[in-house]
Image (spheres, grey):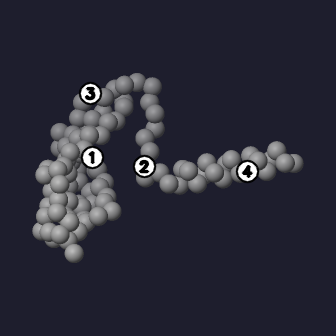
Amino acid sequence: MRECKNYRWIWGAAGLGLAGCAFSVAPTATEDKEISLELAIFPARLSVEDTLATAEVWATVRQGDKPIKDSTAVAFATTVGTITATSLTHDGLAVALLTGPGD
């Protein structure tokens, strides 16, 4: 009976761990199906005091060695300031506007 209780605890802990994931990508057997994401921001820093400070966030998404198909939706989120919620890819690139939090 004790053995069964231990398994319930393990499954509960695994469930809590999975609940904290923001996203997941299923593993694939071939490299041409792997999806990669590269992020860049221009300029690299924003002033937290300037409410008009903005930066472009570039998300380059590739499937294998090729850009992901056009019009693929990419979701953005931030914990400081505001950012474009969703952007569609063109040639593998999705761009979002990040605005500083100001006061």
Secondary structure under badge 4? helix
In percent of width and height, residue 91 lies at 17, 39
Could you say which is closer to the camera, residue 8 or residue 28? 8
Name the residue: 31% across, 58% down: 77
In percent of width and height, residue 75 lies at 31, 54
**The image quarter in which residue 25 lies:** top left
Q: CA distance from mark 2 to mark 1?
A: 16 Å
Q: Which residue is mark 4?
A: 8
Give the crowd class for mark 3: few <14, some 14-19, many >=20 residues within 10 Å: few
Name the residue: 23% across, 68% down: 101
Q: CA distance from mark 2 to mark 4?
A: 25 Å
- Please name which of the two marks, 2 or 1, marks the residue nearer to the observer: 2
Dividing the image into 4 quarters, which one contains the C terminus? bottom left
| N-term mark: 4 or 1 | 4
The amino acid beneath tag 3 is: Asp
Q: In the image, is 59 to the left or to the right of 24?
A: left
Is residue 95 at least partly visible in the picture? no
Q: Which residue is mark 3?
A: 65
Residue, far right: 1
**The image quarter in which residue 96 lies:** bottom left
Secondary structure under badge 2? loop
Q: CA distance from mark 1 to mark 3?
A: 16 Å
The amino acid beneath tag 1 is: Thr
Is residue 46 at least partly visible in the picture? yes
| N-term mark: 3 or 2 | 2
| N-term mark: 4 or 3 | 4
Disc number for residue 72: 1
Q: Which residue is mark 2?
A: 23
Could you say which is closer to the camera, residue 90 or residue 6? 6
Secondary structure under badge 1? loop
Label 1 near label 2: C-beta < 8 Å? no
The amino acid beneath tag 4 is: Arg
